[in-house]
Amino acid sequence: MRLTDLLSGSSFRTSAKVAIGVLVLMSLGGTLFIWSATQALRDVTEQQTLEEAVLLSDVYAAGGREGLVKAIGTLSNLVSSQDRISAVYDEHGINLAGADLVMPDFIGVRDTTLQSVSAKGSQGHFVLSVQKFNDATLVVGRNLKAVDEMRVHMIVGLVVMTVLLTFGALVLGLLASRQSFSKLRSIEGVLARVASGESEARIPILQRKDQIDRISIQINANLDVLSRLMDSMRATTTAIAHDLKTPLARVGLVLNDALDAIEAGRDPHPQVERALNETGSLNEIIDTILRITRIRAGSPRKDMQLNDLGGLIENTLEFFAPLAQENGQTLEFRPGETEKSLLLCDKNMVQQMLANIVGNAIVHGGFGISIRVRLQHRPETLDLIVEDTGGGIAEGQRHEVFDLFKRIDSARSKPGSGLGLALVKAVADHHEAIIALSSTDPGAVDHPGLRVTVSFPSGTD
């Protein structure tokens, strides 16, 4: 695993952005915090200096300059000049008591260093309060060393913390990138195996429920669908090849017979007509397959409009009425509870579905049966029901009849390609409808009949 791969990973790049954000926020926030803390401590020190200056001012008010000199002398002997200083000067600037300082050249409160005012050039950062009386000048100050040291410690701590947080974020990003890259390599390997023909290969799921696991689950689901489609395509290809082989062979035989007739001086027209009929059947099969393929590949809801399902049923029954009459069959339509049953659908597809279901019942139901089409409104579905009183389909074979070219044994003696119900299933799936087969009269032994129920979602009603 190359370092460049890890550094280019989205996890590491995100961590790098987080690290930069931490660096910026810590710099801005830390600077503001340090300034606020040191300023607060400096203000406290200044307040203490002013309070001491007020007390000494009271001493001057009570005892004059002599009292102030005595108080400063006593105070200087009690406290260290490293932390606190005080001094008193006469009107000529001569130091009368206290710290050995040159009288400051300002009045008021100011931060300064003793180097600038000390006669001996002492070091130190102090806040000084300078007050001028009639015959004296009072200087009181406190050392700001603690404030400066705290500022330095806080800056060092801030820098160390920022470096640790930034480094930690980058390390965590690198580890996360390594883990993500390992998963991505696993996904890449599985997809490569699938591309090489291992359709059963799947991505292992670690159940950590992160984004890559969720994507892996979706990829596995898509691979399952792809595998089923490939299996279906293989089965369909095999079925097409098998079912088209016999008609093509018959066409070849018929054309050979036509050639023999020509060589023998006989009229070849009967053989040519038979060959044309066979090729016409082949064209119908191919057209149906293409129609099913287009329906499955089409976008649901595209080109759909509200149509009266009852009107489509009436048109279908009117078309098949002559054929049903020849077979001694009766066609009946029960429209249901409402005058119109509106359905959001592709009119041509649903019309083809109806034609296939009703035509299937007429062809395979048997002589003299009854065929009834009815609509049933339910809270969640609009059910299209076509039922007959024919021989029906055995329960164990009902799930097979929707496959391409699938014909049950009882239907092999009748003309057909085995594509009718496959087209019905494709139309139902396109409309998100559920199709089910059952017996019209389950108690009947000889003629249980067949009921085909197509349940359209009520949202299309």
Image (cartoon, rainbow, N blue to C red):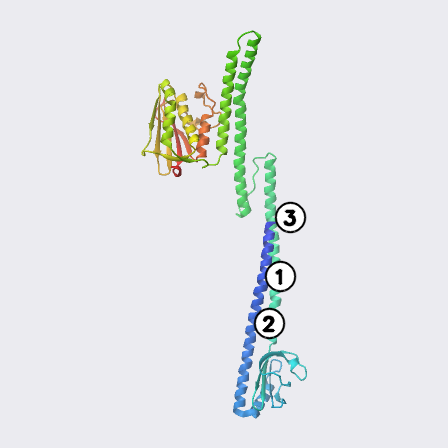
Q: CA distance from mark 1 to mark 3?
A: 25 Å
Identity of the amino acid at label 3?
Answer: Asp
Q: Could you tell me which residue is drawn at 51 percent across and 18 percent down?
A: 278
142 on left or right of 399:
right
Q: CA distance from mark 2 to mark 3?
A: 44 Å
| Sequence order check, earlier mark of 2 and 3 | 3
Identity of the amino acid at label 1?
Answer: Val
- Residue 150's label in the rendered image is 2
Q: Which residue is at the front of the view, 162 or 65?
A: 65
- Vertical position of residue 31 compared to residue 322: above or below: below
Q: Is residue 449 visible?
A: no
| Sequence order check, earlier mark of 1 and 3 | 3
Q: Which residue of the protein is positioned furthest toward the right in this rendering?
A: 120
How would you rate the neighbour count of disc 1 (Cα within 10 Å): few for under 14, some for 14-19, many for 20 or more?
some
Secondary element type, mark 1 = helix
| Residue labelled with disc 1 | 163
| Sequence order check, earlier mark of 1 and 2 | 2
Q: Could you tell me which residue is drawn at 54 percent across and 32 percent down?
A: 230
Q: Which residue is at the front of the view, 241 or 79?
A: 241
Identity of the amino acid at label 2?
Answer: Met
Secondary element type, mark 2 = helix
In the rendered image, residue 216, in percent from the top left (x then y), is placed at 55, 43
In the rendered image, residue 150, in percent from the top left (x then y), is placed at 60, 72
382 on left or right of 243:
left
How would you rate the neighbour count of disc 3 (Cα within 10 Å): few for under 14, some for 14-19, many for 20 or more?
few
Q: Could you tell me which residue is drawn at 50 percent across and 14 percent down?
A: 273
398 on left or right of 2:
left
Secondary element type, mark 3 = helix
- Residue 5's label in the rendered image is 3
Do residues under tags 1 and 2 come within 8 Å of each other at their CB atoms?
no
